[in-house]
Image (cartoon, rainbow, N blue to C red):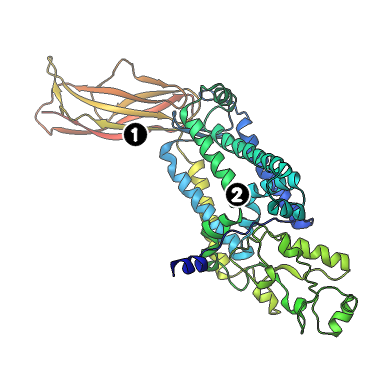
Amino acid sequence: MSELAEQTLYQKRIPIYPRSVKGRFRNLKYGILVLAYGVYFLLPWVRWERANAPDQAVLFDLPGRHFYIFGLSAEPQDIIWLGGLLVIAAMLLFFVTGIAGRVFCGYFCFQTLWTDVFILIERWIQGERPARIRLGKSPWNRDKLVKMTATYGLWLLTAFWTGLTFTLYWGDAPALIGQFFSGDAPFAAYATTLFLTGTTFVMAGLAREQVCTYMCPYARFQSAMFDKDTLIVAYDATRGEGQNGRRKLSKELKSREDRHAQGIGDCIECGYCVQVCPTGIDIRNGLQLQCISCALCVDACDAIMDQLHWPRGLVKYTSDTAKAGQPTRIIKPKTIGYGVVLCAAIAALTWSIMTSASYTATVEQIRQPLFVTLSDGRIQNTYEIKLNNKVTKKVTFKVEVDKLPSAELHLEGLKDRVTLNPQQRLRVLARVRMPPPGIGENQHHYEFVITPIEGIDAPPVREPTVFYTP
């Protein structure tokens, strides 16, 4: 019984050998592929002059706790920016999906981009689809061993370079790559590269469509974002099937007029749309969760229609509303809602970045002891000033006290000025002394005034605090 259940519930993976295709959507995918790979692999090598960090345009410096993206510098306390970026990404995904379906999966997803390259490598070494099918079914011999070794070798090299490039974002790329191959890089660099090499090789090379079908949750919840006006890749069943179904080309069914006269549709059962599909589905069976909307089946069908001199569009981007003969609505309440939230999130993140302070200063009183009576009778309170220079230049601050007449300020080892190097954090011990008070309150409210005087043009920070007396 258990053996029967296992045979029913589990199906061994059927290898998919996508066929090459030419067309406008395939060209669009190639363009996005070149752009994405160019950005990913070249960005760590783009230089950006900095006074206090490696001259790298995009650098995530974990030991120094600074993150650089060209002219923008972020610190761990700026994690809210990452939250805003994730909200923008989510809203953009919902907004685009509501209008154009799973175009992210078909054109921009990392799984799709890397799988495309791995398939290109496979096709370059093993040949077109029929040759790869024959090679897969053939017994192991010298020719198969050479081709499979070459395929896996180039896959592994691509995966390794992918993992290593990711690692280069976390250190100075020229120095880190030299340390990596000389054996002097940190353990984390080797661990990260090895992990990403393995996952890229498996996901893009061995698993491929199974990642989209079984591992990615997007296919499951996309229906919540679809509606009748959402663009999908669809087969025109009315045109393709006619009244009596679809048939292959034959002597009697060669012209479109002859086929229509016998109630036969325009689909000639060539199977090209199935052969080019990277997930191996038949789009003629309707929308399926495996479909990533890459539109390669559209290119395939259009190519056949062009050869037959028949109109294109048997397989195309359309919507349920359009198939029913009504115009597709792009502007609708859901689209407007997603768009408003998306614009608000972009505006909020932009405002937060543009108005971020170039430095921070806080004052905390040391309460053990709360006050000290000096030998000359004066009262002393002690405070800790925390300064954080967030810009990539040296800044000098002047520290003063306000609203506390006759008070004396002493900074430990310093005068009234404190100089911080680019993006330096510093704690300064400040002692405030006053003459012995007369009869009156034992709490005196006043302010520390911390003013940048060199390096940046920014308003002073006023930190209110209390001076305690006996």
As drawn, 15 above or below 199: below
Check disc 2 and report the residue beneath it.
Answer: 206
**Element assignment for label 1:** strand
From where the camera sits, is residue 121 visible? yes
Horizontally, residue 412 falls left or right of residue 455, namely left
The residue type indicated by label 2 comes to Leu
Give 16 or 244, whichever is nearer the viewer: 16
Observer-nearest residue: 261 or 63?
A: 261
Q: Relative to 162, is 19 above or below?
A: below
Residue 146 on image: x %, y %? 71, 40
Looking at the picture, how far across and down is residue 413, in whole percent? 31, 15
Q: Residue at x 60, y 49 (%)?
A: 206
- The percent position of residue 169, horizontal first and vertical second, equals 55, 34
Which label sits in the foreground, 2 or 1? Answer: 2
Which residue is nearer to you in this view: 200 or 470? 200
Residue at x 63%, y 52% (from the top left corner): 112
Judging from the image, what secondary structure is the residue with disc 2 in?
helix
Going 44% across and 24% down the picture, which residue do you hit?
A: 453
The quadrant of the image that shows the N terminus is bottom left
The image's mark for residue 462 is 1
Question: Quadrant of residue 469 in the image?
Answer: top left
Residue 62, placed above or below residue 326: above
Q: In this picture, is 77 found above or below 411?
A: below
Q: CA distance from mark 2 to mark 1?
A: 61 Å
- Check contact, mark 2 vs mark 1: CB within 8 A: no
Q: Amino acid at mark 1?
A: Arg
Q: Residues within 10 Å of mark 2 (few under 14, many from 20)?
A: some
Q: Residue at x 70, y 46 (%)?
A: 122
Q: Quadrant of residue 294?
A: bottom right
Q: Position of residue 141 (x, y in %)?
A: 70, 44
Q: Earlier in the sequence, mark 2 or mark 1?
A: 2
**Residue 73 makes an appearance in the image:** no
